[in-house]
Image (cartoon, grey):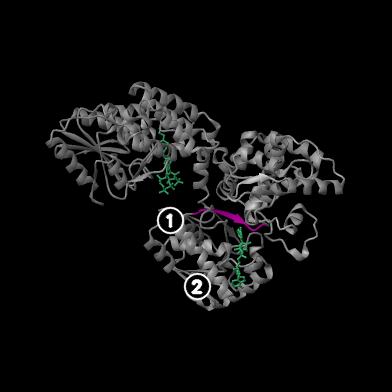
Amino acid sequence: MTDINSVTTLTREGDIAVVTLNSPPVNALSANVREGLTEAFNQAIASDAAAIVLICDGRTFIAGADISEFGKAMTGPMLPEVIETIENSTKPVVAAIHGTALGGGLEVALGCNYRVAVPSAKLGLPEVNLGLLPGAGGTQRLPRVVGVEKALEMITSGKPVGAKQAAEMGLVDEVVAEGQLREQAVAFARKVVAEGRPLKKVRENDEKLAPARGHPEAFEAFRKANARKFRGFLAPEYCIRAVEAAVNQPFEQGIQTERQLFMELMMSPQSAAQRYYFFAERAAAKIPDVPEDTATRPIKKVGVLGAGTMGGGIAMNFANAGIPVTIVEVKQEALDRGLGVIRKNYERTASRGGLTAEQVEQRMSLLTGSLDMNDFADVDLVIEAVFERMDIKKDVFGKLDAICKPGAILATNTSYLNVDDIAAMTSRPQDVLGLHFFSPANVMRLLEIVRGEKTSKDVIATAMKLGKQINKVAVLVGVAHGFVGNRMLARRQEQAQGLILEGAMPWDVDKVLYDFGMPMGPFAMGDLAGLDLGWVKEESRGETIRDVLCEMDRRGQKTGAGFYDYDENRNPRPSPVTEQIIRDFMAKKGVEPRQITDDEILDRNILPMINEGAKILEEGKAIRASDIDVVWVNGYGWPVYRGGPMFYADQLGLANVVAKLKEYEARYGAAFKPAALLEKLAAEGRRFADLDKAS
Ligand code: 3HC
Ligand code: NAI
């Protein structure tokens, strides 16, 4: 055995040379790894070995370029050069893949002559998620192996494929038994040598490109079919152009085109935002005063109280993860309706091919309905999702405290109420916290975990772990009205409502936010959620536009009209009725409509949110600015290519943010008064990101 460097070894298995990488946690292609690979391959090629196997120790094959090196000066050999060294080998090279061969990792594997993988392995080019494209030959080599159509799909979606599917596509040459990768890869290499197979390089194989030549319309069709998905993003279009180059240019030139497009993306603010976001999401999992090795409580059985909009969706998350759930309701009718909605959801997924009929039944079988809270006696966690009323929540938590076993965690899904006041109704406030899911709870990935004053560390650690288990992005937040997300949203809503009483129409406001990259604006969102959410007919006095709309039974999409009019396919149209209501309202108040610019609409929606974010940080209700961004990307569809509101503020420059806020404060008053933290950072020439670095 030869130690090439600290992360690379070169060994022999008889006539086969084996290059092994061991660079935890994910064998990313840092300078050290690139150097090790180059040296190991040079030595192996020069040796008398008949073939070479490349394999990785630890949990995975190479998971890509080392993202933490991006944006800094690169040292050591560049990845394309490393791959060229491998591809120019005079002996067959076999990549042995387990875990995830992603990005640069798959590009290295494509530089090998053959790829073998265990069944659990996944292969993909996820660069697009970082606002990039595969920049080490992936856009040129993958279509040569799997064809243009599949390559386009993989590269622009960033989604990995499993080993079996990869084998069907020709990306994997042999799927080998789990746990026997090393032996099997060596055996495969021997077989290649014994059969005297010609030394074929991926770059030399143009066969699968031929059908796409002279058919630019296929690329156009792909662009059109995905236009909605790609809206606002730069990288998918660049990925398509790089694959077009693979088809239309010779390999060497295609590589040049890929490089140029890659470098452009690397310098773009979008990629900076998406790379920032990659680390932001991972940082959110770390709680400074809750060590990673904190012992967690086992959660084998869950209770959900209330089978309404949220309760049903919450229960589905656990059933999807194989955890049995007891759902308790007050009335049989509500229970039946709730379980019926869950079944319908699963069946819809099944009808689209997402689940088999058996899986639907299996998941439903994990859900047990009941009208008796005593059935929570044996659960490890209860999530309460009853009406948003403090009196009811307090009553319910008193009962849960009496019923649930010692050590069971009691959680509330409240949107706004004070978790400490709820916890105080129990004899175990240390076991109480908020688990704030977002609607629809089976779809939205955000989970705000609300830490009460007395919530114990192991309860937090358990909740964070559980969040991951049910495929959520969990963010720890403090007790505050609306926690992080809804608290900031409220500032935006105030301005949106204000704007339509000054002269902007709801669709004007929505368009600006949609064009900014949000999935929809505040008024379209209101129509979707239902304008009567929290509206009480008996108490309505026509004091707001919403009151008037609801009184006219324009309650949103579900009644065919709200702020917008809807056709039978729920396509929105600006509504002359709403416009008239707004005009009448303004006339009554003696307000003269004025022309409001798109810039003002954007500023007034976004700046108060940023300002509120600063207050949240000031008060310690979020651990990091980046946590706030994770909330907004996952809970509200903030475009990831803009990082999140706090990252966006950093990109604007905090001094500019403060200057603008002051300008608006002079015109519209205290809602725009800059937070002390924001003023301080701006004065010091610092960013929110600098706070995170310091923490
Ligand atoms: N570079 C640097 N660090 C990385 C990394 C990478 N490519 N991939 C993962 N890490 C780090 C994470 O930041 C995390 O660090 P931490 O423990 O300090 O927070 C640690 O590795 C473990 O990562 P996860 O928590 O994400 O572990 P999981 O087991 O949940 O997931 C994974 C593993 C699927 C590999 C996931 O980390 C992942 O998707 N990584 C990114 C893969 C990727 O995007 N590759 C393409 C890179 S760009 C590229 O290759 C350009 C090329 O074309 C030139
Ligand atoms: P919902 O009205 O759809 O459902 C509430 C359900 O609780 C009803 O089915 C009702 O019969 C049941 N219920 C009431 N009292 C009960 C009791 N004592 N025992 C058992 N069941 C009882 O309400 P929704 O929208 O599901 O909201 C539930 C909670 O989730 C609220 O606290 C809300 O603020 C919060 N939430 C709501 C979101 C949303 O978008 N709807 C988003 C995030 C949180």
Please identify the quarter of the rendering in which residue 41 is found: top left
Callout 1–callout 2 Cβ contact below 8 Å: no
Residue picked out by circle 2? 369
Question: Extreme left residue here?
Answer: 194
Mark 2 near ligand 2 (CB under 8 Å)? no
Which label was assigned to residue 396? none
* Magenta stretch, residue numbers: 472-480
Crowd rating for badge 2 (residues with CA inside 10 Å; few <14, some 14–19, many 20+): some
Q: Out of 63 and 345, give the one closest to the viewer.
A: 345
Q: Position of residue 372 (x, y in %)?
A: 54, 78
Instruction: Estimate the spatial distance between the alpha carbons at disc 1 and disc 2, rounded to whole Å.
Output: 25 Å
Q: Examine the structure image and report whether residue 395 is included in the region drawn in magenta.
A: no
Is residue 488 toward the left or the right of residue 41 in the image? right
Q: Out of 203 and 136, give the one closest to the viewer.
A: 203
Residue visible at 64% across and 41% down?
513
Is residue 79 toward the left or the right of residue 349 in the image? left
For label 1, the SS is helix
Residue picked out by circle 1? 351
For label 2, the SS is strand
Q: Position of residue 348 (x, y in %)?
A: 46, 57
Which residue type carries mark 1? Ser
Q: Examine the structure image and report whether residue 473 is included in the region drawn in magenta.
A: yes
Q: Can residue 370 be seen by looking at this rendering?
A: yes
